[in-house]
Image (cartoon, grey):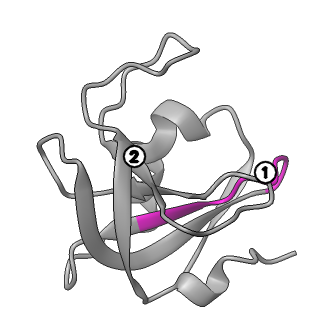
Amino acid sequence: MRSIFEKYLGQEVEIVVDRPLGSKHPKFDMVYPINYGYVPNTKAPDGEEIDAYILGVEKPVEKFEGRVIAIIHRLNDNDDKLVVASVGENFSDEQIKELTNFQERYFKSEILR
């Protein structure tokens, strides 16, 4: 099964960052090595807004506008993630896996382009 979020591939989106780089996860012993947030006014299958990893930003931010370069499609969970970078910037599948491994290591997933 492909992700329901595929329509976002290549699209420019605004992300509200609720877990900035360096912040601690509210429930688990984990620090965010990248900015992480959501697309406002959307709805994911888990009932929350669509989540997004922001790559290539080396400081904590509150908001970010970028292009969806990939989707992490979780095979054992219904909470796929968008992967967003600055327009014109790209990351390999290996780089995406490495940068999101802090959280994605707990799930079986594939990267969709």
Toward the top, the furthest residue is: 29
Residue 46 numbered tag = 1
Q: Position of residue 23 (x, y in %)?
A: 31, 24
| Disc ID at residue 20 | none
Identify the residue at image location x=37%, y=63%: 15
Question: For this rendering, which residue is in front, 94 or 84?
Answer: 84
71 and 60: which one is in front?
60
Report crowding for label 2: few under 14, some 14 to 19, many 20 or more residues within 10 A (C-alpha). many
Mark 2: which secondary structure? strand
- Magenta span has 65? no
Question: Taking the image as drawn, is residue 95 in sight?
Answer: no
Residue 24: x and y in percent read 38, 19
Q: What residue is disc 2 on?
A: 36
Quadrant location, the C terminus? bottom right
The stretch in magenta equals 75-83
Q: Which picture quadrant has residue 4?
A: bottom right
Q: CA distance from mark 2 to mark 1?
A: 17 Å
Q: Where is residue 54 drawn, in percent x and y?
A: 33, 56
Q: Earlier in the sequence, mark 2 or mark 1?
A: 2
Q: For the residues carrying marks 2 and 1, which lies nearer the camera in this image?
A: 1
Q: Which of the 4 quarters of the picture holds residue 7? A: bottom right
Indicate whether residue 77 is drawn in magenta: yes
Residue 12 at what x, y percent from top left? 36, 85
